[in-house]
């Protein structure tokens, strides 16, 4: 079994290395094993993917549920795992930071902190509050016995505030507060990613959802993005296949969807392994 410290160091090394890497997002232990079998080097949980599996929308999962899901994913593979832990499930800096040791106890070697409040009336924390939250999370991460990688997220573009200048200023402030990785979900073109990379001095995570098929790993690598995630993209793709199959049965009375199904022998082989 690979130690948590070893996983944490491997995860840090991926961010420091010369190559852009993809960190796909499983939503349970089974999908984690499948992704590990394909040769990915690290995994990240998806809050939305987990919520969908529970019959809810994103933002409706508790901290305990998210950490239990993360622990199951960590137990399924020897790969480093980071977690989407939303706003760390609290507003006050110290209360948010209290989630960090719980994340470590779940087996995680990385996690994120968002500057989204969850309040539609004031969707983004004021900058001074957001920075204080990042500083508290950084302090909690540094107190751990291994190097947890903390990702700070600027959520403007997901909450009706497509202000690139403010987003960059926030990312710069989060970097100064000690965040290890910076992430602005919702950017939609290569020029925006390039501006963020040029304006910051920490590894940048780029989100590439299904709505952005025009972007490639090579494109993002060229402008200096270090890490690429897909958020709930794989979960939505899986649910899309499920929906198409169910609609075929209901509307046509046929079962041709089976042609695209996961071969059972391969699935049994992957899931039958303790670690991948």
Image: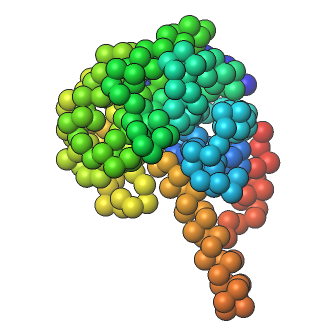
Does 180 sit left or right of 98 as displayed?
Answer: left
Looking at the rendering, in which quadrant would you find the C terminus? Answer: top right
Percent x, y of residue 225: 31, 38
Residue at left 41%, top 17%? 132
Q: Nearer the viewer, residue 247 or 34?
A: 247
Seen at 78% across and 56% down, the residue is 268
In this rendering, would 181 be left or right of 190?
right
Name which residue lies at 71% across and 84% down: 249
- Residue at the extreme front of the image, as rendered: 121
Q: Position of residue 271 (x, y in %)?
A: 76, 50
Q: Quadrant of residue 107?
A: top right
Vertical side of 140 occupied by 54: above or below: below
State which quarter of the image contains the N terminus.
Answer: top right
* Residue 85 percent across, percent down from the top left: 56, 34
Confirm whether residue 9 shows in the render. no
The colour scheme used to paint the residues is rainbow
Q: Is residue 271 visible?
A: yes
Q: Nearer the viewer, residue 24 or 151?
A: 151
Q: Residue at x 53, y 52 (%)?
A: 232
221 in relation to 85, above or below: below
How many numbered marks have been drawn onto this rendered protein structure? 0
Give the side of residue 93 with respect to residue 17, left or right: right
- Is residue 20 depicted above or below 131 in this figure? below
Q: Nearer the viewer, residue 130 or 265?
A: 130
């Amino acid at each position: 079994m690979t130690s948590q410290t070893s996983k944490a160091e491997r995860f840090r090394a991926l961010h420091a290395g010369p190559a852009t890497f993809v960190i796909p997002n499983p939503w349970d232990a089974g999908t984690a094993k499948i992704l590990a079998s394909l040769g990915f080097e690290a995994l990240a949980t998806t809050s939305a993917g987990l919520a969908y599996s529970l019959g809810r929308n994103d933002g409706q999962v508790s901290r305990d549920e998210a950490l239990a899901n993360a622990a199951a994913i960590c137990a399924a593979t020897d790969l480093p795992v980071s977690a989407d832990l939303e706003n760390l499930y609290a507003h006050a800096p110290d209360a948010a930071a209290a989630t960090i040791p719980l994340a470590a106890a779940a087996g995680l070697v990385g996690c994120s902190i968002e500057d989204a409040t969850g309040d539609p009336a004031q969707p983004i924390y004021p900058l001074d509050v957001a920075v204080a939250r990042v500083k508290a999370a950084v302090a909690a991460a540094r107190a751990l016995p291994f190097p947890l990688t903390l990702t700070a997220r600027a959520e403007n573009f997901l909450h009706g505030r497509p202000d690139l200048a403010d987003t960059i200023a926030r990312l710069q402030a989060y970097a100064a507060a000690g965040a290890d990785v910076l992430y602005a979900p919702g950017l939609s073109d290569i020029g925006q990613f390039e501006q963020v990379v040029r304006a910051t001095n920490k590894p940048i995570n780029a989100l590439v959802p299904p709505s952005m098929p025009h972007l490639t790993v090579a494109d993002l690598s060229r402008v200096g993005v270090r890490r690429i995630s897909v958020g709930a993209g794989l979960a939505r793709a899986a649910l899309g296949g499920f929906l198409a199959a169910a609609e075929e049965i209901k509307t046509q009375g046929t079962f041709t969807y089976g042609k695209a199904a996961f071969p059972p022998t391969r699935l049994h082989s992957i899931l039958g392994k303790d670690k991948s």
